[in-house]
Amino acid sequence: MSQAASHLLHTLYNSALDAVFPPRCAGCQMWSKELFCPLCQPLLKPIQPPFCALCGHPFDPLAHSASVCAECRDNRYHQAPAFKILRSVYEFEEPVREAVHRLKYGDKIALAQPLARLLHNYLRQPPVQDAPKLPPIPHDQLALLIPVPLHPWRHYRRGYNQSTLLARALGQLMQVPVGEILRRTRHTTPQVELSAKNRMENVRGAFALDEAMVKKLTPGGGPMLLLDDVCTTGSTLRECAGVLKKFGFKEVYALTLARQL
Ligand SMILES: [Zn+2]
Ligand SMILES: [Zn+2]
């Protein structure tokens, strides 16, 4: 078949699919060719500078004088965050909240693909703040994408890990392997249900390295990117990065689609 004919067939197939299952906005479910419809698009809240140079937590622009937030500053002396930098693309508000919810609980696993494109765009064009200029996530040098694991029981109930879906879709876009080299060693309460104080306690020691998987993948010493759908205080990512660092992986970065503020 000629290329033109196969292209025509492909287009016809896609429009037939669209007629039966019209694409819908991930936020409000109205028919929309785009991931977010023209009504939802302007509601997106990309996280812009100024933010903490390390953990990416936004600062109040009027009160902004420090370069690193109180939590990262305190941790600097006691225990620096194990990740180099953590960034999140959007605030965890509508319509992103609905999109994540559908990916997570609504079995809309097809959303992983367009959501991963948002992550990819962010990595290629991260927002830059004037000072201090920390090097961005080195998207063109990444050796491995690592999804934050679910507890096996929760994984079993849901049937999939939404962070793995995002990582796989992103890995395909970037041609970077995905390694599920972390596992949860115990059940933890969802971070959103806890006070800030209890969140760190909740995830402490909750992750371990799957050494057999590391041996299989032999990721080398290149930069790694931890991925999750949402971060609340960053405690989970700090903990995961800590496990990787303890094992000897020094260049760990973290990225989430959304951040609860
Ligand atoms: Zn919409
Ligand atoms: Zn910080």
Image (cartoon, rainbow, N blue to C red):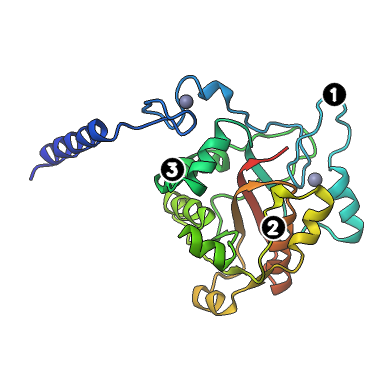
Name the quadrant where ligand 2 sits: top right
Question: Residue 188 or 135: which is nearer the viewer?
Answer: 188
How far apart are the alpha carbons under marks 3 and 2? 25 Å
In percent of the image, x 60 and y 68: which residue is there? 182
Q: Where residue 119 is drawn, which disc sits there? A: none
Q: Residues within 10 Å of mark 2 (few under 14, many from 20)?
A: few
Position of residue 179 measured from the top left corner of the image (x, y, whole percent): 52, 65
How far apart are the alpha carbons under marks 3 and 1? 36 Å
Residue picked out by circle 1: 62
Label 3–label 2 contact, CB within 8 A? no
In percent of the image, x 62 and y 32: which residue is there? 93
Q: Nearer the viewer, mark 3 or mark 2?
A: 2
Q: Earlier in the sequence, mark 3 or mark 2?
A: 3
Q: Is residue 50 left or right of residue 76?
A: left
Residue picked out by circle 2: 189
Q: Is residue 255 left or right of residue 40?
A: right
Q: Where residue 111 is drawn, which disc sits there? A: 3
